[in-house]
Amino acid sequence: MDERILKWLYDIKLCIDEIDSFFQEEEKDFFKYRNNLMLKRAIERNLEIIGEAVNRIITRDNSFTEKISNAKAIIGLRNQVIHAYDNISDENIWSILINHLPKLKLEVDALIKEN
């Protein structure tokens, strides 16, 4: 595997781990999330980094669109957070945290192990 792609995969892994660390002391609670501006911004920043890393990976090697589920949607979320920040839905971000990040974490871990 290309060293740059491996580095970006580790960037994704680190961001997911950081998001997970925000909830080590407490269970994931949407209402607490929604009312904590600092937490929301920290998670959004990590999602931006994840989206940029996925974009760089598939730009370098398009075969990763098949290896990373929803790669285009991840990049689209990054663009939305950065460029359409006023249209960010707490519910949408929360759904991504609960439903999509665990799967992405498994995929990234598997890709790193392949190396």
Image: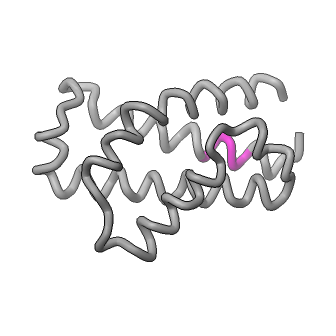
Q: Is residue 43 above or below residue 75?
A: above
The quadrant of the picture occupied by the C terminus is top right
Q: In this view, does 14 lie above or below 23?
A: below
The quadrant of the picture occupied by the N terminus is top right
Q: Does the magenta stretch include residue 90?
A: no
Colour scheme:
one colour
Taking the spot 42% from the left edge, 31% from the top edge, the residue there is 99
Q: In this view, does 103 lie above or below 49?
A: above
Taking the spot 61% from the left edge, 60% from the top edge, the residue there is 52
Q: Is residue 10 magenta?
A: yes
- On the image, the x and y values in percent for residue 17 come to 46, 34
Q: In this view, does 70 lie to the left or right of 113?
A: left
- On the image, the x and y values in percent for residue 11 come to 60, 46
Q: Specify the quadrant of the image occupied by residue 89.
A: bottom left
Magenta stretch secondary structure, dominant: helix
Q: Is residue 58 left or right of residue 49?
A: right
Taking the spot 12% from the left edge, 40% from the top edge, the residue there is 32
Give the camera-side residue of 87 and 19: 87
- Numbered range of the magenta stretch: 7-11
Q: How many marks?
A: 0
Q: Specify the quadrant of the image occupied by residue 97.
A: top left
Q: In this view, does 60 lie above or below 63?
A: below
Taking the spot 82% from the left edge, 24% from the top edge, the residue there is 114
Q: Specify the quadrant of the image occupied by residue 30.
A: top left
Q: In this view, does 64 lie to the left or right of 79?
A: right
- On the image, the x and y values in percent for residue 85 come to 35, 71
Give the camera-side residue of 111 and 88: 88
- On the image, the x and y values in percent for residue 14 come to 53, 40
